[in-house]
Amino acid sequence: MLQACSGKGRVAEEKNMERENTRQGIQVKNLHKSFQTGSERTQVLRGVDFTLAPGEFCAVMGRSGCGKSTLMNILCGLERADDGMVFVDGLRIDTLDARALARYRREKIGIVFQGFYLDETRNLIDNVAMPCGYAGVPAKERNKRAETLLKEFGLFSERKKRPSQISGGQQQRAAIARALVNHPRYLFADEPTGNLDEENTRRVMELFQELNQKGIGILMVTHDTAVAECAQRIVKMEQGILVSQSV
Ligand SMILES: Nc1ncnc2c1ncn2[C@@H]1O[C@H](COP(=O)(O)OP(=O)(O)O)[C@@H](O)[C@H]1O
Ligand SMILES: [Mg+2]
C-alpha cells in the first residue's frame, strides 16, 4: 500500500519536474544503472546527481570500472538508465525513443572517444562531414563545414588522407572536428587523450579550452590529473555516485 502510494507520488513528482523544466544546461537526477552478467547483477550507478551549467567545462575522474563510461553513455543516449532522469536544455532524454535519441545526438551533442572511431574507408573531409549527411545538410555545405574545421584544426593539408595515414593526435583532432560539424551545444569526451602522447594531449586540451571559450559545454572523463585540471571543475565518481570537488 505504502509502496503504491510512494510510487504514484514519485510519478507525479517526475511529471511536474518534466513540465516545469525549462532550465538550460544538463541536470542528472538520481540516476541508477546495473548490469546483469550471468547470474550476477552489478550495480554501477547508485543515484548520480549532477549538473552541468550551459557553457561549463567539467572533468569526471574516478578509478577504473567505477562507472564513468556508463554515465557518459547514458548522457549520450547510447545506453539506458534503470531509473532517474536526465534533462538537456529542458529536454528529458532518458525516456526518448530511438529515433528521437538519434536526433538528440545529431543536433545537440558531439561525442569524442578514446579510440577516435574514424572510418578508414573515407578521407578526412568525408569523415568530418559524415554527421551532416544524417542531418540532411546539402553536400556543398557539408564539405565547406568540414574544410573550415580541418583548417581551424591544422589538418587542411591532410584532408584527402585516410585516418591510418595520419598520426594519433591528428586522428583525434579530426574526430573532434567531426563531433563539432553540426554545431552542438555540448561535447562529451570519454578519455579523449587516453591514446595520445604529451604533446598531442596538450594540443587537444588547448582545443577544448578554445571550444569552451566559444560557449560549448564540455563533460570530459579522464584518468589524468593534469588533463582534468584544464577543466573549470572536477567531480569524482566514488561508489556509484558523483562527489563534487573544485579545482
Ligand atoms: N555492457 C556491460 N555489461 C556488463 N557489465 C558492464 C557493461 N558495461 C560496463 N559494465 C561494468 O560496469 C562497471 C563500470 O564500467 P565503466 O562504466 O566502463 O567504468 P569506467 O569507465 O569508470 O572504467 C564495470 O564493472 C564494467 O565491467
Ligand atoms: Mg571508461
Image: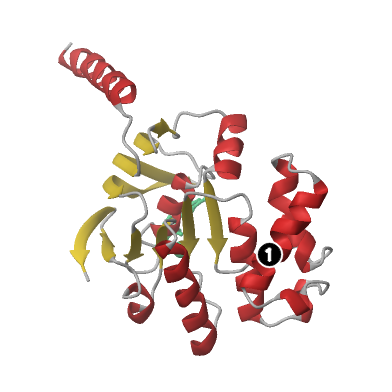
Q: Residue at x 65, y 65 (%)?
A: 149
Any atom of ligand 2 within 8 Å of the CB at mark 1? no
Q: Amino acid at mark 1?
A: Thr
- The reply to whether residue 197 is visible in this rendering is no
Q: Residue furthest top?
A: 1
Check disc 1 and report the residue beneath it. 148
Image quadrant in which the C terminus is located:
bottom left
Q: Residues within 10 Å of mark 1 (few under 14, many from 20)?
A: some
Could you say which is closer to the camera, residue 32 or residue 193? 193
> Could one spot residue 154 in this view of the protein?
yes
Residue at position x 39%, y 36% from top? Answer: 82
The answer to which image quadrant residue 176 occupies is bottom right
Above or below, 70 against 202 in this view is: above
The quarter in which the N terminus is drawn is: top left
Residue 57, percent from left and from top: 35, 61
Name the residue located 40 percent from the left edge and 51 percent from the top edge.
Answer: 71
The residue closer to the viewer here, 5 or 9, is 9
Q: Is residue 181 left or right of residue 163?
A: left
Give the image location of residue 241, x and y in percent. 26, 52
- Residue at the extreme left of the image, as rendered: 2
Q: Residue at x 47, y 83 (%)?
A: 202
Residue 232 located left or right of residue 79: left
Circle 1 — which element?
A: helix
Residue 47 x %, y %: 26, 43
